[in-house]
Structure formats: structure tokens, C-alpha cells
Image (tube, rainbow, N blue to C red):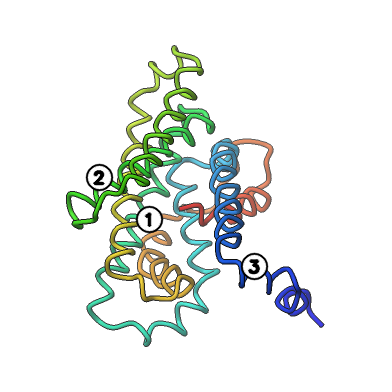
């Protein structure tokens, strides 16, 4: 019996399925861990690759990994939905894949993660102004709390580093705007699509572009072996 089968039949998984609130918190915690770790892995990988090489390799490897799911799911998508999947591929995968490494050539991974917490604010603003989403007191409270935490973390950092690298912080801000647009597109137009299939098809739309950008093999810039670095990058292929 495989480990996957044992886990699927475990009491813990059955309990989580029955307790939706607890399952949500577990998933959010895992997502936060993956999301936060990705910035460290990006920073480490930049010692070997250029930002464009790193972005192209990350997207390409993720596209290959999800290709079997994408091929099975292609015929299950209606034609009008493809434009939203292409938008998702660009906004949630391709553009941030290039923007984050560009920013982290001069920003610390911790500062990048802090600035990226603005995603919630931009998601709310984009939803209100472009998707006619309703604002609730709970949403406003959550955004204000997140912004307060972000301000405290930024102000507690080194001011000289923040000021001198402010232009590179704009790359992170642009990436958060892309993620905000994607979140509202998914909620409005793709909420009925299976998340795994949605991710695989979005990667399918941008995978060829990433493959074109993959550089030819060359000698690494440091002692870190390419295979090990590719494992790190693949492990963080889906923080967005």
C-alpha cells in the first residue's frame, strides 16, 4: 500500500475534510510556508543564474511537471475560458517569475516578502474598482492589520538599504498588482474550474514562452551545482 493511499485513508485527513475551518487554516499555513521560503530560494539561486535564466527555468520546469494534467484537461475547458487562463498564466506565473528575481538582485529576501504582503490591499482595491466587489468591515480590518504589520517590519529594517534600493521594490509592487488582478479574475471567471487543472492549463499557456527564454548550458557562476539549484527552484515553482 502506497503512502498516498495510507494518507488518504487516515483519520487525520477525514477529520480535516469534516472540519472545513481547520482545513482552511492548515492549507493557509502550508501556503505561507511555501510562499515565504520561495524568496530565500530565489535569492540563493541568483548566485548561479541571472534573473532571466532563473525565471525561465522556474516556469519551464513547472510547465513540464504539470504537463500531464494539462493535456488531460485541455478538452474540458470551454473556448471563452481560455482568455482568462492566458491572463492567469501571465499575471500569476510569467510576469512575477521575472519581476521577483529582478527585485532580489538588490533586495533582501525578507524585505521582498514584506513588500509582497501588499497583495491583499491591491486585491481589495482592484476588486472594488474593476470587478465591483463589495467591501466588508472584516476585509477592511484585515487589510489594515496587514498594512500595520508591514509598516512595522519595514520601519524596523535598515533605512539606508530600503532607501537606496527603493526602485527595485517597485518590481515587487508591480508583481503584487499582477497577483491582485489574477486573484480577481480567478474569483470572477474561473471559480468553477478545478484548481489543479486551472494551474496546469495556465502553465501550459506560458510554458512555450519560458522555454524560448531558457538559455543554453554554460558554466555556473559559483560553486553551487546546477542540478541542486534546479531542485530548489522547482520546489518554489508555485508560491503565487
Q: Residue tagged by mark 2?
A: 125
Instruction: Name the front one of labels 2 and 1.
Output: 2
Instruction: Name the front one of labels 3 and 2.
Output: 3
Label 3, label 2: how far apart the Cα atoms are: 33 Å
Label 1, secondary structure: give it. helix
Q: Residue tagged by mark 1?
A: 92
Q: Residue tagged by mark 3?
A: 16
Q: Where is residue 129 in the image (x, y as percent from the top left)?
A: 17, 49
Residue at the far right in the pictured view:
1
- Residue that appears at 53% across and 55% down: 237
Q: Position of residue 170 (x, y in %)?
A: 32, 32
Instruction: Name the front one of labels 1 and 3.
Output: 3
- Residue that appears at 53% across and 62% down: 61
Residues at discs 2 and 1 in contact (Cβ within 8 Å): no
Above/below status of 228 relative to 84: above
Which quadrant of the rendered structure holds the N terminus?
A: bottom right
> Image check: 37 left or right of 79?
right
Neighbour tally class for label 1: few under 14, some 14-19, many 20 plus, Cα within 10 Å: many
N-terminal-most mark, 3 or 2: 3
Above/below status of 4 relative to 177: below
Amino acid at each position: 500500500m502506497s503512502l498516498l493511499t495510507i494518507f488518504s485513508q487516515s483519520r487525520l485527513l477525514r477529520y480535516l475534510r469534516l472540519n472545513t475551518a481547520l482545513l482552511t487554516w492548515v492549507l493557509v499555513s502550508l501556503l505561507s510556508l511555501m510562499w515565504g521560503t520561495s524568496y530565500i530560494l530565489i535569492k540563493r539561486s541568483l548566485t548561479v543564474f541571472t534573473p532571466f535564466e532563473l525565471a525561465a527555468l522556474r516556469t519551464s520546469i513547472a510547465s513540464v511537471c504539470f504537463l500531464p494534467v494539462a493535456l488531460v484537461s485541455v478538452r474540458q475547458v470551454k473556448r471563452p475560458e481560455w482568455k482568462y487562463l492566458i491572463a492567469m498564466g501571465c499575471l500569476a506565473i510569467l510576469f512575477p517569475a521575472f519581476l521577483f528575481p529582478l527585485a532580489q538582485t538588490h533586495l533582501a529576501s525578507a524585505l521582498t516578502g514584506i513588500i509582497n504582503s501588499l497583495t491583499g490591499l491591491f486585491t481589495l482595491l482592484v476588486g472594488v474598482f474593476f470587478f465591483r466587489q463589495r467591501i466588508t468591515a472584516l476585509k477592511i480590518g484585515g487589510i489594515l492589520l496587514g498594512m500595520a504589520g508591514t509598516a512595522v517590519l519595514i520601519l524596523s529594517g535598515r533605512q539606508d538599504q530600503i532607501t537606496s534600493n527603493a526602485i527595485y521594490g517597485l518590481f515587487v509592487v508591480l508583481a503584487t498588482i499582477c497577483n491582485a488582478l489574477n486573484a480577481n479574475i480567478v474569483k470572477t471567471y474561473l471559480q468553477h474550474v478545478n484548481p489543479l487543472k486551472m494551474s496546469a492549463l495556465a502553465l501550459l499557456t506560458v510554458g512555450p514562452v519560458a522555454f524560448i527564454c531558457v538559455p543554453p548550458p554554460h558554466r555556473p557562476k559559483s560553486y553551487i551545482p546546477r542540478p541542486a539549484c534546479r531542485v530548489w527552484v522547482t520546489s518554489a515553482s508555485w508560491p503565487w
